Amino acid sequence: GQSLEQPSEVTAVEGAIVQINCTYQTSGFYGLSWYQQHDGGAPTFLSYNALDGLEETGRFSSFLSRSDSYGYLLLQELQMKDSASYFCAVPYSSASKIIFGSGTRLSIRP
Amino acid sequence: DTEVTQTPKHLVMGMTNKKSLKCEQHMGHRAMYWYKQKAKKPPELMFVYSYEKLSINESVPSRFSPECPNSSLLNLHLHALQPEDSALYLCASSQDGSGFQETQYFGPGTRLLVL
């Protein structure tokens, strides 16, 4: 089966850096995605890693280590608007089937 | 235009009612999805349509009936729902569902309450 584990809650200070980890167990691995969802909003795609290493997109970066079945999302220069839930996700059995991790609720304090 | 729209935003229905949720996208995507999301939980895949054909049904009860009238529209017909079906129903679309790196674009969802 497929399973993803991530912390349920993380708290950080505005302007700081935070890392949200995700470990996965999958039969077949095709890549790791990250989605952001604000309360009452739709999930929005942030990043996708198919290969080992760091992908940077503005203040957000995502890292993957296939040998460790581990990835993380790094958020820099935190802003209050970054308060949201963050889900790691993997496709399984086919590209159109995605399983999401349980989500990490990020709270930013001033 | 990278928008997926869903109507209605909110829906309250009784267990004997029949209602429909609607989803529309104009990005030329050929794969469309229905997800169910309970509070503080991740989205769970219900159905996938690829090129207007149902390609995945995640063992969803028959009281949920999807329909894809054309490549831009996706409906979810609801009948004889249970209170535990109350949730946020999300629609999404992607290029054609064949690429592992495809981005799924989500609509804002319909918040459903079954009384």
Image (cartoon, rainbow, N blue to C red):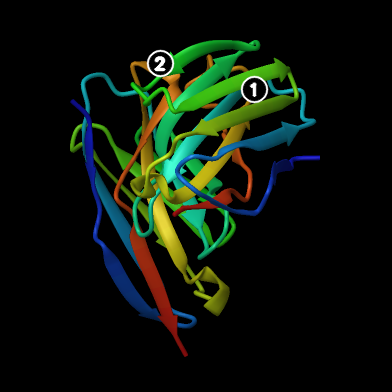
Q: Secondary structure at mark 1?
A: loop
Q: Secondary structure at mark 2?
A: strand
Occupied quadrant, residue A70: top left
Instruction: Check disc 1 and give the amino acid type.
Output: Gln
Q: Nearer the viewer, residue B4 or B111?
A: B111
Above or below — where is B64 with respect to A24? above
Q: Taking the image as drawn, is residue A75 in sight?
A: no
Instruction: Check disc 2 and give the amino acid type.
Output: Ser
Q: Chain for mark 2?
A: A
Question: Which residue is located at x 57 percent, y 34 percent?
Answer: B104
Q: Nearer the viewer, residue A70 or A9?
A: A9
**Horizontal and vertical percent position of residue B7:** 70, 45
Q: What separation in Å lies between label 1 and label 2 (alpha carbons)?
A: 14 Å
The outermost residue toward the front is B16
The outermost residue toward the bottom is A110
**Horizontal and vertical percent position of residue B103:** 57, 33
Image quarter where the N terminus of chain A lies is top left
Above or below — where is A22 with respect to A27? below
Question: Which residue is located at x 45 percent, y 19 percent?
Answer: A95
Q: What residue does disc 1 label?
A: B95
Question: Which residue is located at x 52 percent, y 69 percent?
Answer: A82
Residues packed near mark 1 inside 10 Å, few (<14), some (14 to 19) or many (20 plus): some
Discs 1 and 2 share one subunit: no
In the rendered structure, the answer to whether residue B53 lies left or right of residue A18 reads: right
Question: Which residue is located at x 48 percent, y 40 percent?
Answer: B16
In the rendered structure, the answer to whether residue B21 lies left or right of residue B69 reads: left
**Horizontal and vertical percent position of residue A76:** 48, 68
Tag count:
2
Q: What residue does disc 2 label?
A: A94
Above or below — where is A71 with respect to B74? below
Q: Chain for mark 1?
A: B
